Amino acid sequence: MKVLVIGSGGREHAVCVSLKKSPRLTRLWCAPGNGGIAQVAECLPELEAGDLDGLLAFAKRQAVDLTVVGPEAPLVAGIVDLFQAEGLAIFGPNREAAQLEGSKAFAKRLMQRHNIPTASYRVFTDREEAQHHVTHAEAYPLVIKADGLAAGKGVAICETTAEAVAAVDACMLAKRFGDAGATIVIEEFLRGEEASVHVVTDGETLVVLPTAQDHKRIGDGDTGKNTGGMGAYSPAPVAEGPVLDKVIRTILIPTIDALKREGITFRGVLFAGLMFTKGGARVLEFNVRFGDPESEVILPRLKTDLLSLFELAAAGRLKDLSGPDVDERAAVGVVVASAGYPDAYQAGKRITGLAEAAALEDVEVFHAGTRRKDDDLLTAGGRVLCVTALGAGHAAARERAYAAVDRIAFEGAYCRRDIANRAL
């Protein structure tokens, strides 16, 4: 099969590495790709993930058998609807289903209508009403979220009234997130431990993937600013065993069924970000694609043919899949970032030591923000690499991951040193 992967980050590199293992794969492209993806796929730097017409034209011209969408923005923009209208197979939810991530208000209202456990909330389209709400709130912290896509930066955890007022104004007055912040969701702050559960579904059958937990804060001990993720590990002990069974029974299956009852068939990856509170698991947010860096620790543990999994889900035939088959070993992934991230950072720094790191047993180096220039590999993003290792338990996997990280160098390289501490 000829496959096109859309995206340019560590998630897409992990997807491409897994797809490359399939005996059914004959050709693999990635648009636009990055410096690491170029080692396993033909990159198309001229095709950005948002160029829906260009991607469609390429898929038709090359007679691509299956397109796999990595990032959320093309899904919310309706790339699946576009491809399906032309009779092309594509893995991912259509525009209606992608609202689960594209609109937090849509997701919250769906959960409320169908009694899916989540934080209490209110939706606001009027700034003055939102300001009145936060200035008269009975309890803090409050969580204020831009309704639409904001590149992971549209959520503010506000400890005080002043912080909440500023967060409302950032969305609705300063328009920091553009149209994404015209509507906001204000919800209660949930206390507990976070983890994520990913499923691949065709709208009827669910294939549950390994659980994972990521580390969002920039500093050790979960300190400092939020980031896109500084590392992850799998499995997440807090979400395993009977707890996972209950999540499937009370959250994942009801969500797919709720969409179906409202006339929406979800085909693709459903990623539930969960808070495990004293009262049980509650949904923080839904995403409609693989997490990053979660995918860099989930996919290396998945032994099932990823191409067959995607193909059957896109065709509505997941019931034909046996499995999933999962490696019993743990995976730990450590993100190596540019100095200054998540704020301003410099790109174009030469990276060394990649071959030495990748030569270690059961280590994979996924590229999130790199580019090639002649014979050199340069940094090209805030999160540059995710170094993942497998091991007989979290401790062994972590030791191996950091041994690989320590072989890699570039000016200003930074990583957290406590990834997977909670699992240990």
Image: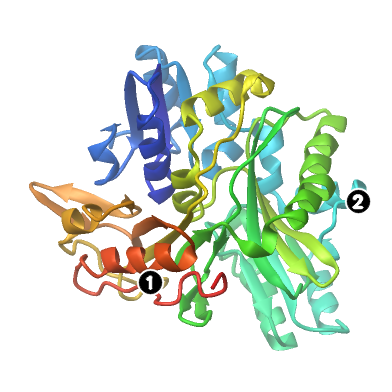
Quarter of the image with the N terminus is top left
Amino acid, disc 1: Tyr
Nearer to us of marks 1 and 2 is 2
**What's the residue at 52%, 49% (across, down)?**
328
Residue 115, labelled with which disc?
A: 2
On the question of residue 189 being in view, the answer is: yes
Tell me: residue 28, above or below residue 165.
above
Nearer to us in this view, 328 or 245: 328
Q: Secondary structure at mark 1?
A: loop
- The residue positioned farthest toward the front in the image shown: 392
On the question of residue 172 being in view, the answer is: no
Residue 174 x %, y %: 59, 69
Residue 11 x %, y %: 44, 47
Residue 70 x %, y %: 48, 40
**In this figure, which residue is indicated by the disc labeled 1?**
341
Q: How many marks?
A: 2
**What's the residue at 72%, 73% (across, down)?**
192
Amino acid, disc 2: Asn
Q: Label 1, label 2: how many angstroms apart (C-alpha)?
A: 39 Å
Residue 331 x %, y %: 46, 56
Which quarter of the picture shows residue 213?
Answer: bottom right
**What's the residue at 59%, 21% (across, down)?**
312
Residue 101, labelled with which disc?
A: none
Q: Is residue 116 left or right of residue 412?
A: right
Quarter of the image with the C terminus is bottom right
Q: Earlier in the sequence, mark 1 or mark 2?
A: 2
**What's the residue at 52%, 68% (across, down)?**
215
- The residue positioned farthest toward the left in the image shown: 375
Q: Secondary structure at mark 2?
A: loop
